[in-house]
Image (tube, rainbow, N blue to C red):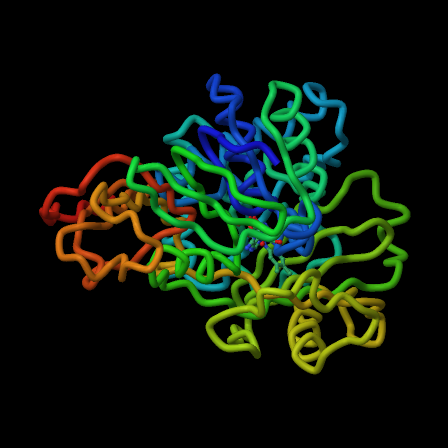
Amino acid sequence: MRSHARVVVIGGGNMGAAVLYHLAHEGWTDCLLIEKAELTSGATWHAAGLVSRMIGDHALGYCHDYAVELYKRIEAETGQAVSWHDCGSLRVAASEGHRDWLMHTRDVVCGRGQECHWLEPAEVKRLNPLYDTSAIIGALYTPDDGHVDPSGTCQAMAKGARRLGAQVIRRNRVLDVRPRPSGEWEVVSEAGSVVAEHVVNAGGYHARQIGAFVGLALPIVPLQHHYVVTDAVPEFADMDHEIPVTRDDYFTGYVRREQAGALIGLYDTPTRWRGGPTVAPGSRRTNSSSRISTASRRGSSAASRGIPASRTEALSGSSTAPSLTRPMARPWLGRHRASATTGSPAAPRLASPGGRAWENISRSGWSTARPRSQCAASTPAVSEPGRTAPTPTPVRARTT
Ligand SMILES: Cc1cc2nc3c(=O)[nH]c(=O)nc-3n(C[C@H](O)[C@H](O)[C@H](O)COP(=O)(O)OP(=O)(O)OC[C@H]3O[C@@H](n4cnc5c(N)ncnc54)[C@H](O)[C@@H]3O)c2cc1C
């Protein structure tokens, strides 16, 4: 294994691959991604792949808009199929309060220059004839949404990064990350050590363990997330369009077409992962099987009120996997700065007062710097060498 890289990214899921890809496009090609198993072995492999512009938050919305554009073009750039389906999406409302909230979202989406419409039930029925619209007053519609094959996007970004000179090493677990007196980091892996100027923790539901290598307590919790797949839905065969991804907050889930059947995602059982706050380091792909869990049956039974095609006797398979949950359910990004004074791996790294601090930068429009003891942390975390962090000064939160 090489001895030095400008950046080492730990984790080859969609986030790690995206970091490597975008660094390479910025000219940072002396970068290395290390994945303990295969690319897309973690939550990425399980994702239903929904990508939506229906985001009522300006900053996060721009990220989603960018993702749609990226997934549309990356197949042509890399030759790797990502299976983009531009079917649009619907989110139904059954009360005036819910419509108010959706109208706020619509204004934010339109404010970003994207297309978004309020539809009456008859129009919802036209787009998704399977949906029982009798209990709804309408739906928000974003026609330029869709879904992708998430393992395809991950492979495509890794391929794009490799083409520009970045490197990916698979089947190599990172065992530790140690600060060096130079301010750099030693990333210790099964295949040897590499010294890096920056380390990106993109370990997904293992990010908590990776954070612990440098003494960080990342407040992220793995929850179970399910989806089920139905047998072939006969009505799909005669349809001249793909139904929009339909989100229904009343069964707290979503449905989209999956080949000849339907895929139904369920949020109504936010069960903590059975291993507690961490997922065992050895865990790879989790539970994807033809055995339908009780929770999945309950959820899809609820879904069948809105989508008759999801009746439980027609379920053919399910996927249950840990999915990360962060404070406020937002993506959090932040830097963890090394102290130039801490060089010994044996040193209690976060115990030296003033030696380290967090700087959290949320993409959703506010930033704060706080001592670790007070701070909700972030992932992925980017370490920065060679600097002793100043005493953190709280910055007043700005909400959008
Ligand atoms: C059932 C399900 C459905 C979902 N549906 C959607 C959806 O429709 N739309 C959406 O946007 N999101 C969806 N998600 C969420 C989405 O899957 C995740 O947010 C996303 O995949 C996280 O990507 P990641 O790269 O952060 O993590 P992961 O994909 O988990 O990648 C982390 C990688 O780090 C590696 N790793 C961990 N520890 C080490 C180590 N010590 N050394 C080296 N490598 C290590 C792991 O092997 C893994 O490959 C869904 C999730 C689930 C479970």
Q: Position of residue 11 (x, y in %)?
A: 56, 47
Q: How many marks?
A: 0
Answer left or right for 338 relative to 38: left
The residue drawn where x is 72% and y is 46% is 243
Answer left or right for 22 relative to 213: right
Which of 188/211 is in front?
188
The residue drawn where x is 59% and y is 63% is 253
Which of 279/301 is in front?
279
Q: Position of residue 321 (x, y in %)?
A: 64, 65
Q: Would residue 70 be seen by someone viewing this image from the given angle?
A: yes
For the N terminus, the quadrant is top right
Answer left or right for 220 relative to 191: left
Q: Position of residue 178 (x, y in %)?
A: 39, 49
Q: Quadrant of residue 390?
A: top left
Which of 226/332 is in front?
332
The residue drawn where x is 51% and y is 47% is 140
Classify 85 as above or below 100. Answer: above
Q: Would residue 308 be seen by someone viewing this image from the given angle?
A: no
